[in-house]
Image: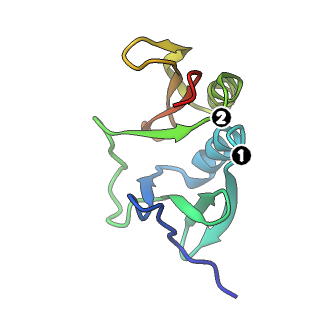
Amino acid sequence: MTMAVISGDGVFSHVFIGAADVDVSTRFYDATLGALGVKNLGPFGSGWVLYGKDKPAFIIAKPGNGEAPSGNGVTIGFAAATPAQVDAFHAAGLAHGGSDEGAPGARGHLPGAYAAYLRDPAGNKVVSYAFTDGN
């Protein structure tokens, strides 16, 4: 049985981001996404690494055109079940080559929002949000 490379969720088929160094980015995403219950589902093709809960939805790899990854202005948000998971996501990211883009805490622009922002080792901006009001 082969695993689908992309799974979709009714809105997105997948998110694919560039990694300057796939091994470094894999360590970062294993730690940060692991804190959210998202697993490294293994390699695919020539250098892709697939992540998901049960099926792939997030992919990292060197850009296919051989140029440096670029994601200025793009933010990818990952859902957390609790503020504690957001805290763990942020701490794991800092410990695995990421940089702070917004410490864990309440976000006043959305009711009940608790979030933390990071830049991954390739400079991509990622965030994890939990909603304490049930949204």
Residue in the foreground of this view, choosing between 82 and 121: 82
Q: Position of residue 48 (x, y in %)?
A: 54, 66
Q: Which mark is residue 81?
A: 2
What residue occupies the far bottom of the structure in this picture?
1
Mark 1 or mark 2, earlier in chain: 1
Q: Position of residue 97 (x, y in %)?
A: 60, 32
Q: Residue at 56% across / 54% down in the picture?
A: 22
Tell me which corner region of the image, top left, top right, bottom left or bottom right, holds residue 55. Answer: bottom right
Q: Position of residue 121 (x, y in %)?
A: 52, 37
Kind of residue sitting beneath label 2: Ala
Instruction: Tell me, yes or no, whether the two marked residues, 1 and 2, touch with CB atoms within 8 Å.
Output: yes
Q: Residue at 65% across / 85% down in the picture?
A: 2
Residue in the foreground of this view, choosing between 105 and 75: 105
Tell me which corner region of the image, top left, top right, bottom left or bottom right, holds residue 91. Answer: top right
Q: Which mark is residue 37?
A: 1
Q: Residue at 32% across / 45% down in the picture?
A: 70
- Disc 2 residue crowd, few under 14, some 14–19, many 20+, Cα 10 Å: some
Secondary element under disc 1, as helix, strand or loop, is loop
Residue in the foreground of this view, choosing between 37 and 23: 37
Can I make out residue 114 in this image? Answer: yes
Kind of residue sitting beneath label 1: Gly
- Disc 1 residue crowd, few under 14, some 14–19, many 20+, Cα 10 Å: some
Q: Is 51 on the left-hand or right-hand side of 59?
A: right
